[in-house]
Amino acid sequence: MRQASWGIWFALGYLVAAPSPAGEPARSPGEVFDAAAAERGRIALTLQGFLKPEWSESAYRRAGRLWDQPAPDPGRDPDGYAAAFRHRYGLHPAPYPNDGLPMGLRRGIGRDGVKSGLQIDCMACHGGSIGGKSYVGLGNTQLDLRPLLNELTIADGRRPPPSTFVLNTSRGTNNAGMVAAVLLSLRNPDLSFRAFPMPLGVNLPELDTPAWWLLKRKRTMYYDGRTDARSVRTNMQFMLGEKTLEEFKKLEPTFRDLRAYLLSLEPPKYPFPIDSAKAARGQVVFEETCARCHGTYGPGGRYPNKIIALDVIGTDPARAKGLSDRHVAYYNSTWLGAVHPVSLERKGYQAPPLDGVWATAPYLHNGSIPTLHALLASSTRPRRFTRPPSTGFEHYDTTHVGWRFTEVSAEELASTARRSPFQAKFIVDTGRFGMSNGGHTFGDDLSEDERMDLIEYLKTL
């Protein structure tokens, strides 16, 4: 594989790698929010490219020839083809100028500095939509990443490289942790390229993508809460496929601005009516049951930055256990970990802030629970369920808060004759590695009335 390909196939270590729940605003003591830096960061994130082209622009137009359904002609019906392309791979319209491409694709930067060809970017996973409206920083619950990479490469006349790990088994998940680990294994401690990968003993599962707007409440990031949220360099890992150490250093100020932009993001407000009396009762339930881990909200609200031990939270341990000590030590020995090293202590999972929680279904770090009601009543959780065909509100459950779903039996899952590979990716199987829907049973002791009051309050956050 040519070197530039590593930047595409493994570029997702950038912010895609599940920044996860952590503490009070992620700023150093005395740090003041810099609006000018945030604006520069917005421009850098949405209007600039950082990687070389991976595919020709014609690959975008030819990809439809590989689909199992007829595709609109991209020349005669470009808008129809663009919509079909987005649906095929779970991408969304860009709410910023993007040359007609969906969030997640952009024109790459050639050696002459001119935009040409196509490249993937972090918005593939961190550019989501709800109610049909696109949001920067909302996790993409529709993304089908592996076919996107494979089919663009085939459409470009090349054979996709083999994969040594599962990237995603259903729509909406990704294995950015393994992406980052593979990228790092291709570098020496001085970030020069290695001839052969360094064995680092990492075995991480696919995960759901958290919302970027949570970062402002955190002191640490990633699901295990082991990385300082002030780290800029950890957000640069996606460029390990092609950048030199000197290029990393030159780009660090830009990524510092980009972090400032992430701290400016706010969640969308719940768009449906809320029963204020129920929500008021639910706030009492929340403060008695949930606040000690998830914090308080409104004026004076505080977030405790708690990491919950695995034997207490009980959720799937694969993500917490999969990052090896060898990998952490190796990362810390490089420029990436020099200023903000990753903690060597493995504890469990961090209880996330819940700002905009209504918009972030499915739930848990692996997206294994479709609604808040199922999260708070563990006996109702489906073992296998469908993700919705789109993020339109016709698929949204305003009562249980989350996505409407259909349970899938083992027999239906085993029957491949009735569904295409495209259709099969809409099914979440919680029996797969890292995808367990167990744990977080703290809502089981609530009465159904208390549970529904609590859900009504969560709509207000």
Image (cartoon, grey):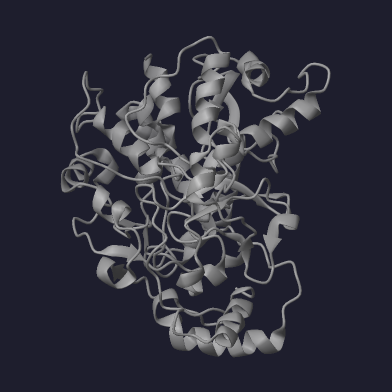
Furthest residue to the top?
157
**Image location of residue 457, percent across then percent down:** 61, 80
Give the total of numbered labels.
Answer: 0
Q: Is residue 108 left or right of residue 252?
A: right
Image quarter of the C terminus: bottom right
**Above or below, 308 relative to 456:** above
Image quadrant where residue 451 sits: bottom right
Furthest residue to the right?
76
Furthest residue to the front?
411
Question: What residue is drawn where x is 54% and y is 43%?
Answer: 171
User: Quick check: can you spot residue 98?
Assistant: no
Question: What residue is drawn where x is 33% and y is 57%?
Answer: 228
The residue lying toward the viewer, choosing from 336 and 213, is: 213
**Image location of residue 254, percent across then percent down:** 47, 40
Question: What residue is drawn where x is 75% and y is 26%?
Answer: 81
User: Quick check: can you spot residue 446?
Assistant: yes
**Image location of residue 291, percent across then percent down:** 45, 81
**Above or below, 391 relative to 421:** below
Q: Is residue 454 left or right of residue 270?
A: left
The residue lying toward the viewer, choosing from 174 and 1, is: 174
Image quarter of the N terminus: top left
The residue lying toward the viewer, choosing from 12 and 456, is: 456
**Image location of residue 242, percent across then percent down:** 38, 24
**Above or below, 230 relative to 326:** below
Q: Is residue 205 left or right of residue 270?
A: left
